[in-house]
């Protein structure tokens, strides 16, 4: 047990999982704080459960986590040194003060001390193995707070492609060349076309603070996956933050410390721009405020003057919209709940294929 170092095991597992699981330094420090608080110090299996709860956001990642964690345990496991019982033996034999006893009996007592190896207790390793069903019980709770994975976000962002022909005519159009030759009766010259380029432009408006605090981790993943052009294949992303309603300005940073005039943001929007708003629209707290509905209607009218490709992503389920401001805002813009199906429908609305509200 002296060789059991939970922080070293967590660090090794973190280095292997951080890219695939999207982990940051905050998750590693959270695991360290849990160990410092007494969680996972009983053995590797207890540490496995703590790390799984902190780093696995869905059940489909648990199997990959267990495989990596087992590999880390196999690499960090060390056989117990044979000198440990010898270190324990002097501590047991030195306390008896009477030297009058024959020392000859003290030396034979050293081999019987060998059973003290059982005191080292290598048994805590299999103690937590029957706790497997606990992961299945806690799975639905994790899914309830994490309805959409980063992989699903990246997959859906790719549907936002908008290809246009741009640049010089340097691509041979075989079909047009054959049609021209058949129409004229002889080959005159080849027909060339412009290259297809991806010209999609996304304006992402994220509600920050207040009732959106429980969804900050999700909105951060939404922002990161959209801004990663190699994965999402979005050419240009303009990001802005607001709180409840964007009045006359928005913010460039999630801490709402760098104001940005709303007029400058609207100037970036044209007919080919897709605008996605992420907000609970008052459904999280169950409020219905006419001021918020009126201000949101004015903001959406300004956006719709420039583009019709607008969608609203609500982290609260649709069953919670009734009687709140979200019920009325959903009539002003296509609103979808934050799950795989809702996110896919939002992408269709941003492409101009579906402008109806989610039903």
Image (tube, helix red, strand yellow):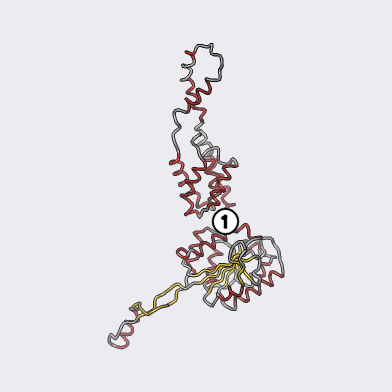
Q: Position of residue 150 (x, y in %)?
A: 51, 59
- The relative height of residue 59 versus residue 312 in the rendered view (above or below) is above
* Image quarter hosting the C terminus: bottom right
Q: Is residue 228 visible?
A: yes
Q: Nearer the viewer, residue 76 or 326?
A: 76
Give the quadrant of residue 230: bottom left
**Which residue extends farthest left?**
186
Q: Position of residue 247 (x, y in %)?
A: 66, 71
Q: How crowded is the residue under tag 1: few (<14 C-alpha within 10 Å), some, or many (20+)? A: some
Q: Position of residue 172 (x, y in %)?
A: 33, 78
Give the quadrant of residue 78: top left
| Residue hosting label 1 | 146
- The relative height of residue 323 versus residue 266 in the rendered view (above or below) is above
Residue beneath the point at 48% across and 68% down: 234
Q: Secondary structure at mark 1?
A: loop
Residue beneath the point at 63% across and 58% down: 213
Q: Position of residue 224 (x, y in %)?
A: 52, 61
Residue beneath the point at 44% across and 34% down: 79
Would you say 265 lies left or right of 107 here? right
């Amino acid at each position: 047990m002296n060789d059991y170092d939970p922080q070293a095991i967590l660090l090794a597992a973190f280095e292997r999982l951080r890219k695939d699981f999207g982990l940051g330094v905050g998750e590693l420090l959270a695991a360290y704080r849990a160990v410092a608080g007494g969680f996972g110090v009983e053995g590797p299996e207890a540490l496995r459960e703590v790390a799984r709860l902190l780093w696995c956001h869905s059940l489909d990642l648990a199997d990959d986590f267990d495989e990596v964690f087992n590999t880390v345990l196999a690499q960090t496991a060390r056989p117990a040194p044979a000198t440990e019982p010898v270190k324990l033996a002097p501590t047991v034999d030195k306390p008896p003060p009477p030297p009058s006893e024959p020392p000859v009996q003290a030396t034979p007592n050293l081999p019987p001390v060998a059973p003290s190896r059982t005191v080292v207790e290598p048994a805590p390793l299999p103690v937590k193995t029957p706790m497997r069903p606990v992961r299945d019980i806690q799975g639905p709770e994790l899914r309830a707070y994490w309805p959409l994975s980063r992989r699903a976000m990246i997959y859906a962002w790719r549907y936002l492609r908008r290809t246009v022909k741009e640049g010089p005519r340097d691509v041979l159009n075989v079909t047009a060349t054959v049609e021209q030759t058949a129409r004229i009766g002889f080959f005159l010259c080849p027909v060339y076309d412009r290259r297809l380029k991806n010209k999609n432009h996304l304006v992402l408006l994220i509600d920050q603070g207040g009732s959106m605090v429980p969804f900050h981790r999700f909105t951060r993943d939404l922002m990161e996956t959209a801004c990663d052009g190699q994965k999402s294949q979005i050419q240009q992303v303009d990001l802005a933050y607001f709180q409840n309603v964007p009045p006359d300005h928005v913010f460039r940073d999630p801490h709402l410390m760098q104001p940005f005039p709303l007029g400058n943001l609207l100037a970036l929007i044209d007919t080919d721009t897709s605008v996605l708003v992420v907000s609970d629209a008052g459904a999280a707290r169950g409020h219905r405020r006419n001021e918020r509905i009126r201000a949101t209607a004015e903001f959406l009218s300004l956006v719709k003057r420039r583009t019709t490709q607008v969608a609203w992503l609500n982290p609260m389920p649709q069953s919670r919209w009734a009687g709140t401001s979200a019920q009325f805002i959903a009539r002003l813009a296509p609103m979808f709940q934050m799950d795989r199906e809702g996110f896919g429908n939002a992408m269709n609305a941003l492409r101009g294929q579906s402008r109806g509200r989610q039903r």
